[in-house]
Amino acid sequence: MTSIRCWTVMTLTAILFTGLLGLALAPAETCLSPFVKRLEKPEKYLYVFCVDADAKDNDFLAVIDVDAQSPKYGQILYQLDLGSAGNETHHFGFTDDRTHIWGCSLFSNRLFVINVADDPAKPKLVKAFDSSKETGLTGPHSPYALPGRMLISFLGGKDGGLPAGLAEFTNDGKLIRTWEMPHEAPYGYDVAINPDLNRMVTSSFTPPQNYRKPIAQMDLKQFGDKLLVWDFRGRKLLQTLTTAASPLECRWSLKKDAKHGYVNCALADSIWVWEGDAQNHYTARKLCDTGKLPVDLSQSPDGRFLFVSCFASDEVQQWDVSDLKNPKLFSTVKPGVEPNMLHLTGDGQRMYVTNSLLSTMDRSDDFWVRLIRVGPDGMKMDPKFNVDLTKFKTGPARGHDMLLY
């Protein structure tokens, strides 16, 4: 389930590349809602949502200096204490005006509302609350900005079971409405909206009562295999599409006038594509096989490339999907053990990577944030950017989602 933007023009090729893209640069913050105000300057701060590794100390948001001109480049500048431990902080996202971040937690059901506008270098926690009390849903996962609102996807229903559901809040945290996933497709995970098509797609994972167990004890039969296609404005389910097991991150294609999108099926080591016809009727099919356990998905500003992190084979793959009938593996890098979340900048040249999935699924105690440089010939690791997340006073932290400011 995150997001990074801006441009540092480094070569003549990059200048021509960005010039041709024009305004298409902004939507390249591929883990952000299309309703979020876009970053219009080079990134200065990287926010990383961190889980205290042994769950004994409070979870926090780390602020990392990513201003290439700064003497503190690549250093952790600040930690925002979230005031509680054992949350399993996971995904977070901006409000539509980019003044606040909403953060989700998979174990405690807490939602965190964080002010980043007043002092971006030192964000402030303005609200934290148990979302399950009002919604009757559990496992808040994806915060997705709507105009003046936040849409939250939940992985479970009452008591951590099924069905999962969705909930809408005002930007200041007042519940507007909730709705459950249908009986025939009760799982939830991510959400992606294409406002031009008036379509929303949601994906499937597993409920809290399953993912809270150690991975060896998880029931693999309790994972979804459905994509749901919704009338976005009407909030009505239109279609149920079957994919392989555990379709996770939903990404509408960034190509102009595209009617398709992508999802990584984690338990089937593959990427699938959903495609709409002239009547906006959708089908889904396997696009390509990937490395082991693909857990996050991003795409280039022009929609030509997909980037997928393969958690179990310790690699990030770059796929050329300009021809949906003939996708090609373009480049591969190995950032380290269990790469997870990917966030690509608006110029498509820098991609930040973290390496924690879930405390119940991680197999490494070495946690970090690293940087991949993306060029005309593919991906290469930046040896100068390596943020160690194991040296905090409270001990190691599991870095998961990321945002830029």
Image (cartoon, rainbow, N blue to C red):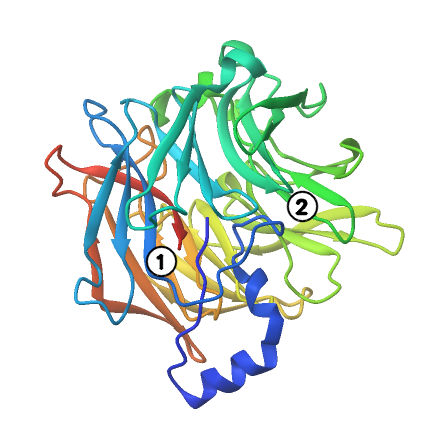
Number of numbered labels in the structure image: 2
Q: Is residue 206 left or right of residue 402?
A: right
Label 2 packing within 10 angstroms: few (<14), some (14-19), many (20+): many
The residue singled out by tag 1 in the image is 352
Q: Give the label on residue 289, or none.
A: none
Which amino acid type corresponds to the residue marked 1 in the rendered image?
A: Tyr
Residue 351's place in the image compared with 22, above or below, is above
Q: Residue at left 28%, top 58%?
A: 370
Which amino acid type corresponds to the residue marked 2 in the rendered image?
A: Ile
Label 1 packing within 10 angstroms: few (<14), some (14-19), many (20+): many
Residue 130's place in the image compared with 102, above or below, is above
Q: Residue at left 54%, top 48%?
A: 97
Is 396 in front, or is 290? Answer: 396
Q: The C terminus appears in which quarter of the rendering? A: bottom left
Q: Residue at left 55%, top 17%?
A: 137
Is residue 309 something one can see in this rendering?
Answer: yes
Is 321 in front, or is 202? Answer: 202
Is 350 in front, or is 377? Answer: 350
Q: Quadrant of residue 114?
A: top left
Is residue 304 something one can see in this rendering?
Answer: no
- Badge 2 vs badge 1, beta-carbon distance below 8 Å: no
Q: Quadrant of residue 66?
A: bottom left
Q: Quadrant of residue 180?
A: top right
Q: Is residue 126 left or right of residue 86?
A: right
Residue 106's place in the image compared with 196, above or below, is above
Q: Position of residue 170 (x, y in %)?
A: 59, 30
Q: Position of residue 241 (x, y in %)?
A: 73, 38
Q: CA distance from mark 2 to mark 1?
A: 24 Å
Q: Give the label on residue 193, or none.
A: 2
Callout 2: SS: strand
